Amino acid sequence: MTDTVLISLKKVSKIHNEGRPNEVQAVVGIDLDIARGKVTVLRGASGSGKTTLLTVIGCLARPSSGRVALDGRDISGMPERFLTRIRQETFGFVFQGFNLLRGMSALDNIMLPAYPQAPPHRWLRRRALDLLSMLRLEHRADTPVEMLSGGEAQRTAIARALVNDPPILIADEPTANLDTALTREFLGIAETLKAQGKTLILTSHDPRVFEAGMVDHVVTLRDGRVEERR
Amino acid sequence: MNHFFARHLYLVDFTVASLGRRRGRNLGLFAVYVLLVFVLASVSLMTHGLRREAQAILESSPEIVVQRMIAGRNDPVPTGAVAAITGIRGVRAVQGRLWGYYYDAGMRANYTLMVPPDRPVESGAVVIGGGIARLRQLDTGDIVHFMAPDGRIVRFTVSGTLDSASELVSADLVLMNEGDFRAFFGFPADRFTDVVASVRNPREVGTVASKIALALPEARVVTRADMLRTYEALFDWRGGMVAVVLSGAVLAFVILAWDKAAGLSADERREIGVLKAIGWETSDVIAVKFWEGALVSLLAFLAGYVLAYGHVFYFSGALFEPALKGWAILYPRFRLVPEINGQQVATIFFFTVVPYTLATIFPIWRAATIDPDTVMR
């Protein structure tokens, strides 16, 4: 069966600090299709441009040139407000280092992405607790995030990414600081999400990730260009 | 529930949690803020209260007071002046007054001894003000002794105490009859302390005053408007002096607020980046910072103002008494009548809450427009 294209990139380039002495061309003329409901891994050495490409795919940054289409709709030139709306509804992010807000409980961190939509509070709390339960973390709901272990913090970050029920989950180097057992646990969660129909886009240079059985596509980047795809 | 209110409830909830997460810093700022509002509001309430008291007194004071001057000093007015002033066109009523000061060495306080024009007092009796009653622990029926200027000890019976809406009017008053007054001070029978006059047409006060000055060349004529101006100048001067001293504190607060607002920590920048990345709009981040500034400001303003109110009206403005109530020694338990003036509240609100809230929002707006991908770098 042929994959349906969810996200399509045409000649996408991204220049950081454009016009300044510290200008860097992070991504150069990339053409790439991301398949719906599949797991795609962007691999490459540090500085290869995979995180920058992830920010462009996830509407966290606009491309300097080229086009990005989501479900066939060109989103590359959209104003920030529309991109925010797309981020809210379409993407869930698991950041490298997780970026949970310290001083707040795991439950409060998970509910945060839904605040601007202001759903009924009881419903939102139930949804966050269900996610914690799915990730076997319900007993840590009221624990401040700085008291969580690495694995617990990552599962909290995953729950936060899923609270708005986005069709696409983006994770930047999700196993960078995890041991083998926790990496296996992450891959298990990723597989469950894939089975639920989610599209996963990961960056990683960890062979335990891009060689995992549930990964459908691996795109290798070098110096901001696609070197290989499988 | 309306989406707008529901959204802001969530944002306020997040703001309160944020304030709690930086408890130490926010409590420090809150304390400084409360102190500033307390000091400014205390000065404002007290100056306004004193001015209002003075106006209350002057409303019931005579339109024109005529004194006699010899070599630039006050001298008793001959009783004949009453007839001379009565004859001037436009004058409605004229009355000679008898009053003077008595220093109570034992209590180290000055009293005002006076013959009331409209209240008969029996010979050998006095009616005393609330301040003296408290100071010397006197009540109706008690005996009080005063030492006359010639060294005699004169005994009076307290026949009543004065109950006045304004403590400033009555606290130090001792009322006695004319015979007792003249005998106590050795005051000549053909003299008054001063003479007061009322005028038929209030708009003619200035003209009548000029006529009196012309008819009695040795007299000094003081109108109610003159006295009002003097009081206003006095309180404005006192309030201004304190304001100048306090301007240093206000400036220090502005610097602190600006530093707090402009100097976003790396932690706060990261937090804004995270919020934007997970789907918060720039307006959501600004709203949170607005609520942060508004909550701190409003609570500090409320706390500072309530403390100032208690300080001024229940503790006699103890901290600023020496600066604002220059004659405080006369009134050991001087209390102003509590009152809140809307314009006053608005002025202090405008000079404390508005600048702080704005100073909090402006730099945040700059930070909130940063691309959310900074959190990924």
Image (tube, coloured by chain):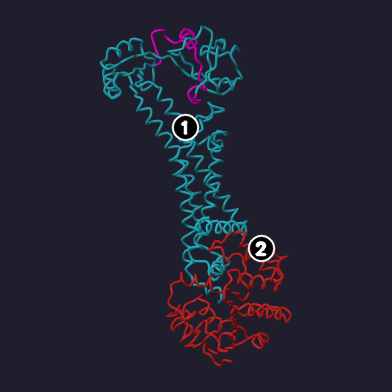
**Image quarter of residue B200:** top left
| Residue B104, image x, y percentages | 55, 20
The percent coordinates of residue B30 (x first, y second) are 57, 51
**Residue drawn 50% across the image and 29% down it:** B327
Using the image, determine if residue B62 lies above or below residue A62.
Answer: above
Q: Is residue B178 magenta?
A: yes
> Disc number at residue B76?
none
Q: B287 or B170, which is in the foreground?
A: B287
The quarter of the rendered structure image containing the C terminus of chain B is bottom right
Q: Is residue A209 magenta?
A: no
* Residue A106 percent coordinates (x, y): 66, 65
Expressed as whole percent of the image width and height from the top left, the position of residue A75 reads 45, 77
Q: Residue furthest front?
A: A1
> What tint does the image give chain A?
red
- The amino acid beneath tag 1 is Leu
| Residue at the disc numbered 1 | B50
Q: Is residue B179 above or below residue B218?
A: above
From the viewer's side, name the closer residue of B146 and B236.
Answer: B236
Look at chain B in the picture and name its colour.
cyan
Residue kind at label 2, given as amino acid type? Ser
Q: Which residues are magenta?
A: B165-193
Q: Chain of mark 2?
A: A
- CA distance for labels 1 and 2: 53 Å
Nearest to the observer: residue B120 or residue A43: A43
The residue pinned by badge 2 equals A105
The structure residue drawn at horizontal position 52% and vertical position 49%, both measured from the top left corner, is B298
How many residues crowd around disc 2 within 10 Å: few (fewer than 14), some, or many (20 or more)? Answer: many
Where disc 1 sits, the SS reads helix
Q: Are marks 1 and 2 in contact (CB under 8 Å)?
A: no
